Image (cartoon, rainbow, N blue to C red):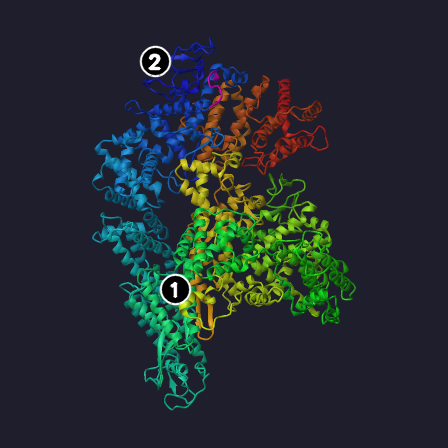
Amino acid sequence: MHGKSVSALLATTNERPSEVKMDVMEGDQMERMETNEEEVDLMDIELQEKTPDKIFTPKRQFHVDYLIMKCVQPALGNVKDPPTDSSRAIERLKIILNSLQNDSCVCDLTVLSGIAKHLTSILKEKEQGSTTMMTHWLSAEASKPENINRAGTFRRFAVQCLESKVIPLLAGIIAFIDTNRNLDILTFIEQWKIDLWLQIFNDPELTQLRYTWIVSPSRQQELQEVIVKTTSLEGKVFSAVMPFSWLIFRQIDEVLRNTMNTKEVRDSWFDVVMKATEIFQELPLGKLLSSVEGTYIHPLLKSYILDFVHMVYAVQSEEECNLVCETVRIGCKILIEGEFGRLLPSLLGCHMTHILHDVRFKNFSHIVHVWPGVSRKTVEFQQKESNFHLVTDEEITLDILALHMLIDHLEPSKESLNKPETRMKWLRQVCDYRPIIERIFGHFNQDTDRREFHYGKKCQRGIEQARLQWTRVVVVKLFIEHVCTSGKEELDIRRCMPLWQTFREGADMKDIKSLEKMERFLKLCHKDIVKKCFGDQAKCISCENPIEGAPVRLPCDHVICRKCFYDCVTLKEFECPSCHEKFPGDLNPDKSENVGEIRKYQDYRRRCNSFFMEVVSQLCFAEGTPPSQEVIEKLLSYIIGLTKGKKIERVVSRELTIFDDSIDPTPVVRSFLLQQLMQTSGHEIETHLLAYFNYADRLVGTTGDKQQLIELCLLVMTCMEDSLHQQYANREDEITMATKMLRDAVHNITGDIELLDKIDNLSKVRFSLTVVSKYIHKLYGTAQKSMPDPTVRKLFDAASKLCEECGSPWPRRYFVKQLCRCYGIESYQTVVTKSEASFLRWVRLPELTGNKVEECHDRYIVTGDEYKELRETIVTAVLSENSERLELLLQKPPNEWQTRIKLLLALHREMTMNNVYGGQPQKFTDKGKDFLNEFIMNHVIVINKEITQGILRNTLWRLPGNIIPRMELADQNISCLLTHFLVMMIEIPGKTTLLTPLHRIALDPLGMTKSYFPTMPQDEVSEIKEALLAARQQTPGENPVFYRCPNGHPYVIGNCGRAATVGICKACGREIGGEGYKLRAGNELDTGHDRTETGHILGRATKMGPVSAPERKLNRASFSVLRLLTHISMYVGANVNLQAVCQSIKPNIEQADVGRYLIEHIDLDLTSVQNVLGKNKDEILVLIHFLLARIMNEHTIAIIGENQTPNVCGLLDKASRSKWEEDFAKRYMEPVIQDMQNILRVINGKILNDQRLGADPLLQILYETDKPQDTEAVVLLHEVPSVWRYRAMITVNHLRQNLDAVKMKLPVLRLFLKEEHHLRAIRFVPSIIRLQKMLIQKYNRKLDRAEATTLTIADVKVQMRQDRRLKEFGYLLEDYIEAWNCVRESLETYLCPANESLVTVDKEYCRKDITEDTSISHLIPTYKDAGLCSYAILFFLLKKQNIFLDNYCTQTKQKEDNLPKVHVKDISSAHLISYHPDKDLLPMVLANCNYSFEVGQGTRIDYNVTNLERQLMDRFLFSKSFITKIHEIETITYRSESTNAVVFKSLYVRVKQERLNPAVLSQICGELRLKSYPDLCESLDKLDIAISFLKSVGSDPESSLNDFMTNTLKMDNPFPSQKAQQATRCKHTMSLWITLAMERAKFLAKYDKKAFEGISENFKKPLTEEQTQDVEDILNRLPIELIDIFVEFLFECIVLKIDVPQNIDDEDYVDMSKICLRDALIGYFDACPYDEDLTIEDTLMTAIGQLPSDKEDPNRILTAQSIEVWSLVNKVFTSKHRQRH
């Protein structure tokens, strides 16, 4: 061994012993190890170093086999399995031991030899990477006295030292070779598999097992426990049938994908497979496989395909697995044709088949998910219908065949569609199936468009057949949802089966035949309804046709049909067609005696029309392709008709309906059909658009007004522009297409082209310039400057070329409008200042050249005309030095305090704001300013002289806010807003009004330091309490009790609800809980007192994002505005009393930093309001000024006299704050927000017409004051100003704002829009779960917490690239980050139940972006620290779905119990409210947003909100699941120090533990004392191995421990004690271990040796003489029997409680060494880890209680001295025992 490293010692000879036995070596045999022919005593191996340079040759060759056999059992104990495969440990043990005992020699290759080779290889790799000396290690270690002491002899320790090096590596090797239960193959009867297994395992070059696989990722520490991996797609355990199939998979996949990356255009996929085959067969593994004999190729290929499918496909059943395997085989055979049957091409062909058809395999998996029985049904169908065209091996058809089966499964029974209950069940089934069905159709269309040819002819035929049947299903579904009702009063079509039968051959709504079938069915239904309502109808006296709708009775009592009536009205022929009696032009045709029947009939018609429009939008124009020409013509015929009178014939418009009596009295052009056409593509689309345009042209042409044609063009252009925004929603597409459109438009804008082409071109220019403005603002419109990437630079260049060369000024003007109206004028001004760059010079409008100082707009004019008059009069007075007119205005004003506000604002505007011009020529002389100053300061109307003087002298603000030369527009805007608020607060009367809280924050901040500031987060523990207490119904045994830590943070104790253990508060780190049912000092029972913090508690704005979620009951808009007003109030308050406001801010900041702190919040609030309301910053400022003016104007005598309670005025409690917020929002903010559009229109008009700034050319451009030309010719459409008019885009925010003005209830739509900012993130839940599983699977028990905090995402990406999972990790990470950004603000205050505690995510985590430098611990779910981010985001989103569904059920009057339920571990997208806001929600909003213009009335936007709500429920909410057991989210188990306490805690979970009977213990101890110390140590080692298995697999607590160790673990003579062998059960394992360990400790203590090897040094501090004397005094008062019990009790407490591993970086870190020993012992008494209670005599408990523990006592004994105390107690006991005997 001299000078040998471990790997050198383990280098094996080529020879093997003839026989291998697993007998455990005892006595002297343990001091020897066998070699080839004879035994060699370890002492024969010279250990002393002779000469440094002499090569040492041992007398015998050291052999590794027996060392491996000695180590295999403890190594197996260190191998751990996933919780779902816990029984695997025993199976693995049997397989390994049997293999080692019965190795079948195949060319001298065995399991043992394979292990030996891998051990040597791994150790060499380890040693090569080590920086320390790896030789002479054994002699140095074995020579240490403590090591010889433990082993008994030098030779024993030499063996033990080798074992310690080998065991962790051997555990890693065993875990590796049992991946996917790979060891099972050794038990198979197929000898060729065993041979191949051994061949691969005996060549480390083939397995490529590296040392890095066995150690922790960053610290490279060997793992105490190694997790067995599985390589199945979803991490589920499966049993491989092909030896080392995952290794073959990995190498083939890498070779194949590298070959694909170098594929040339002319190469086919067959060529790629063959090229990859040539590469693979040159690799060692490929060479081995290519040598397989022909007879084994087929079974090998079959076995590999089976494993391959498990690795790439989520298998749910055996039938499904067999179907997929057969499909892979078919695809491979088709792909490689004649090469199929050759092993290597076939293996690679399987991989390529899956790569090419990955989506199709996933589609089949999704079908199985929604209908688990489809696999069995498919197999049965294949057997029965073998001639069916989709049952074939000529092409892959599995997914399409399953699609047919799935749609056939929707075939309703005879009466199921005629009953409401069974209809709903059928609808739910349709909704469950729809996503996957439509996904398959979508993929087929994509494949066809891209000409990828993944579907054969039979599949194409199958798809078309399935589409016809699915359209049939959808038609019936829509009919049930729209027309069939469950009400008792409404007219109902209760029998739906006739419609199902109508389309028995399938339906194609793009074909005229199907449309006509549906029309006939609807007319038959209509006929029945008419008869029910109005009885048998006579003929119309005008057209003499039977009346088919509600009749119209004329004053003359004649009855005509509605069509004839509307013909008369349209042609203004107001007389009876029969008797010619005149009737009024405003005659109401619905006025009748049968009002109720007419109402029912009209409701039915509305439902029919809604159904018909859904069929048109969803089916006629499905999949982006238009219907046939016949269908288009039919649809056009529905919306246009001819009215014939006596003398004239006129074109009329109608709603899109099959009923021909719905005529518009005034022509109306509706966009519905146009919008549907816009969403399609194909060569026919231009023809269809032209047909529509010609129809509309004819319609508006009836008026003779050419301006109406312009309006028509604008409507068409608007629809086209919306379509472009919808079509190019992602960044890459919009930039690419906008660049192309701008380049194409340069010469087309002014060109002579067809009108429709011109409209199309103009819509593209508008779209493109909107995109340009977005990126210009993003890069240059803010204070930060960024450089564009090459694609964006090309976009800017194209915009520049268009604006410079198109020959029209309008595109540039339109761009400026977009930039200013969307992002604010200050954004444009910022861009202009940066326009020195060549590619930005074009942004300057030629008419706005010059370098003048910019002054912000006067938004004070919102206060009214009196303000404008005062402002102009002040200017006149200063210039003329004459105050007569001003005096007149100020004499006896109608409302003095309001006039005073307006006067101060006017002074600020004209006098203070003049300072912005700095050194430029002033419009006022110093003499004139002094004149005004004297007049104002001496006038009786002025009360607050200080404020007035501050305004006049520009010294109003002690903080930043006074006007400085060339002040930025943004700063001017803020200053004016602050001034407006300050002036109003100072002058507004009333002491106890609804305005008082803000008034006091602004003017009396000292009195509000203990108030609950508006919009601040609050403690929601009461709500959590209710939820947890309500949950007791499901877990009756639980009794959650709530407590508070010393700092007031809440936590909960479950089970009995009493304190039994000590923990750490997650919020502040203080100790919580207690011991012996006694709480720690400072902890208390939660009395229900709310701990919400007062003051301002948000922290810095720079670490926050814009408001994404409101607090309490406010909506987002009101919440954002109120938070802005709060911060403005605080800023004003800081101007009054800076110290008081500083005291209100938490966490504390420097007093000098208060101003900047609040300004940052005000800026953030403005951005939040801007985002929520969808307006630019200029418009937001207008709204806030208007709100302040509204508060002033509505501050009537009644409001001044209000008497709000002191709690409300002072915001003294949480409830008062909540009530005040709701009342304030309802009175002041909600009316402004609801009427926002009109307010902005009026106020912007006033600003535009303001004589002071009205001449500003930029304002005139922005607010479109261009006067229309006398004649606006269509041929010059590009010069018509209205073409370049700004309009707000249709967005979800736009819908939300319009919905506020709708009086309909729409509870579900309103609820959805309120929560949409969070609901949109639920779609990421599957990705979050997959990411968490991926990381847990990779790092579980492999990382410790400290490593996880240093391992960054960038580091993990490197590792994922090595694992070939980087792409998957990348897109999962992107989804996680997007979800995180959606909810992180809400997580700051979210109380998340986790592991029986209520915790919140650290605000610092919430306020940080996730980047590549972020530690991976943020992404791995845990109950604390950074990992709580990952746990909380998932818990929050799942809980959000449950809460939303609960509210949804309440609004729709459903029972929550009727919702489908799914366990948290079984979640898929189908269970979730899953939608993409841009790809799913926005198109739905656009589809229900219709433009129309009525001749003479202009264009109007209408949302079909009722239909939108129904679609939203149908698409996003129907059939979604309630998530159960959310608290069972999987979390990671970090690798920790393996102490006895940790091990026994795991053991107790598997096998409940009890103490051995004292008599039995006494007898066992007596027997042990007769054995040698090495025997005792050996027994403990064997028991450690047994415990490692028991804590993993468990056992019957009553079963014999000796039998388990002997029969199951194959150990000989596990115990030296006969009584231990007879009496101990598995439930006594811990007790026996404690007994053995204590006997060992006593033995060592007897000879003054270290008795507590392995216990932390932190607990081995010495006792002082005084402490020693105190302990001895206590012990001397005890009988020897109690001292003996105390020795055992203290030993147990040290091992199981005190020496618990702690991570100093953990939030719950407790330094056990600083806890007094007395408390630790008492705590252990109440929480010992046995099933029965610990019984100790009162005398001993009294003695323990006498141990010094007072903090003030200098002799206080800590757990840091616990080892010394035990030694002392044992010494006293030994002494007394010796004296007695």
Query: Residue 816, position in %: x, y?
Result: 51, 58
For numbered disc 2, what is the local secondary structure?
loop
Residue linked to disc 2 = 37
Along the viewing direction, whichever of 859 and 55 lies nearer the viewer: 859
Task: Give the number of the mark in front: 1 or 2.
Answer: 1
Circle count: 2
What residue does disc 1 label? 758
Residue 1037 spot, x, y in % from top left: 54, 47
Q: Is residue 410 above or below residue 1749?
A: below
Compared to residue 1655, the image places residue 1326 above or below, namely below
Could you tell me the amino acid type at mark 1?
Lys
Q: Position of residue 1657 (x, y in %)?
A: 59, 25
Vertical placement of 1353 versus 987: above or below? above
Mark 1 element type: helix
Q: Say what amino acid the circle numbered 2 marks.
A: Glu
- Relative placement, left or right, of 417 versus 824 is left
Q: Give percent across and percent down for residue 516.
A: 30, 70
Query: Which region of the structure is painted magenta?
Result: 130-137
